[in-house]
Image: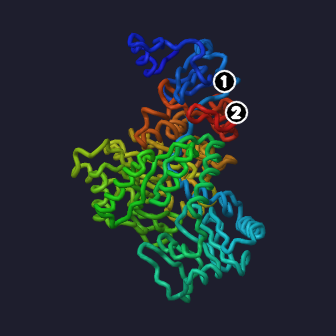
Amino acid sequence: MLRYSGFLLAVGMLWWSGLIFASEPRDGTADLVVINAKVYTGDDGFAEAIAIKSKQILAVGKNTEIERLAGAATRRIDANGCSLTPGFNDGHVHLFSGAESLQQVNLLDASSLEDIGNRIRSFAIAHPQRPVIVGRGWLYGFFPDSLPTREQLDQVLPNRPAVMKCYDGHSLWLNTAALAAAGITRNTQAPENGIIVRDASGEPTGMLKEAAMKLAEPILPKLNREEKAEALRVAILEAHRLGVTSVQEAGIGLPELEVLELLRAQGDLKLRIYVALDGHPRMTEEEVDQFDAWRVRYPELRLGAVKLFADGVIESHTAALLQPYANNPLRGQPEYTPEDLDRVIAMLDRRGYQVMVHAIGDAGIRMTLDAMERAAKLNPTPAKGRRHRLEHIESISREDIPRFRQLGIIASMQPFHANPNSNIFNVWAANLGPERASRAWSWKSIQDAGGQLAFGSDWPVVGLDPIPGLHTAMTRQTLDGQPADGFVPEQRLSLRSALDAYTSGSAYAEFEEQKKGRLSPGLLADMVLWDGDIFSVPVGQVKDARIAKTIYDGQVVFE
């Protein structure tokens, strides 16, 4: 049955005041119609067709009903039975570093250490004018003991500085020339919450972990505001190609806000962005005052959250664990003391900010849940609805799974992080041991316990493409179907659950569930048309589908 948007009914009520507009739309109302589609509405199932007018969804229903809304000027798209779903809302991206990564050595899908070397060498040859070669995406599993060395990078680039960031963004790999250029020697002291990996003689090996990565910043190329804006324009086109219509930026500052405002003013910000600002353990009320001032200065940008880090990552033994690592006496490296985390979260909660906390290990997750629970008791009436979030949640204690529903905390997870390649088995799972690895990325358990999921990519930690993430969420297998039985297969989701987490779930995570995330009348016209019907193929074949068209703000922005 045809469903009309609430705003049209309201407009119809104004007919007696002189507006010439009927309470039901007349022929020719729609700007765009899509017919003969498998329309997944995201709320009450499926429809055949959809009509769009003035950036909003006008109606959803049967082909015959939607055809009545098309006129001579209406654009018609015949979907030929292909699926039409809400536009993807990436719940956790680093848009600026992702945009810059498009101009760097791409190691994300490298297949071996030899492949890594060939890619770096080829990029350096193709860019002889660059004084420092920068890349991103290597996996720990390609290296003995999971850590690369400067000597390995020297074999590829012996004379030009090279800096390669790990796929997870928590470690840097430098060659000898880069260490020298940055002034990093055996006498260099690591900053707080940072580690300079050293050999038996005390010399730096070329690995910088966590906050120690800042030591390399002076030699890294810096883009000016216009260059960053151009990089973002390219990134937005890439998002459109992949069906991504909204993103949630996981931590930026004033320089990036200025770039976003520049794009917005020029009409080039054709991507819905929700912004988290960068926080830190010693945040003060005065710094939050500054955040408030930025909200006033940039009213068109949605500055709603603050991003914190509870811990590091499992691969480098910096994620905080309740018990020591299986192959290391450490329990990780929390970024906050419990007291600092309690103070900062309570302060931000009271001031009306959503808090997004990177929490990967079971101790980091518990510490964060505890801090959010205490904040709710201290601030019984927050400035706005409380929807705090944990980001990543890689290995959780079973006792903490029900707390997401109990505390109303969102589980913001990135399914392709669980892609069970050799890095997962040889490094991630080996570091944890089998019992903790059995709780890997427990999104199904959190959902079954009533928790709210929101999916994203963490680009450029992995690629921006949502389809591999959907595949991982549904199969717990690599793209080539390994392992045959799946990695922790009890955490598999249905296609609809995975899509919802990437659309309506992410919309809920940014307080926008009444505006987008479903294909329902009155909501924003952001949607993707696939090249086939993804609901009629085995779940293992969804990965082979592609986006045929992306519709953003009622306009076709990619086809």
Q: Residue at x 72, y 80 (%)?
A: 158
Counting from the top left corner in percent of width and height, residue 382 is at 26, 46
The answer to whether 362 appears left or right of 555 in the picture is left
The residue that appears at 59% across and 15% down in the rendered structure is 69
Image quadrant of residue 53? top right
* Type of amino acid under label 2: Asp
Query: Could you tell me which secondary element the residue under label 1 belongs to?
Result: strand
Mark 2 neighbour class, 10 Å CA radius: few under 14, some 14 to 19, many 20 or more: some
- Residue at 43%, 60% in the rendered image: 361
Residue 317, labelled with which disc? none
Q: CA–CA distance between discs 1 and 2? A: 19 Å
Label 2 sits on residue = 531
Above or below, 555 relative to 358 = above
**Label disc, if present, on residue 75 of the rendered structure:** 1
Of 31 and 343, nearer the camera is 31
Q: Amino acid at mark 1?
A: Arg
Task: Using the image as rendered, state which of residue 96 and residue 91 is in the foreground.
Answer: 96
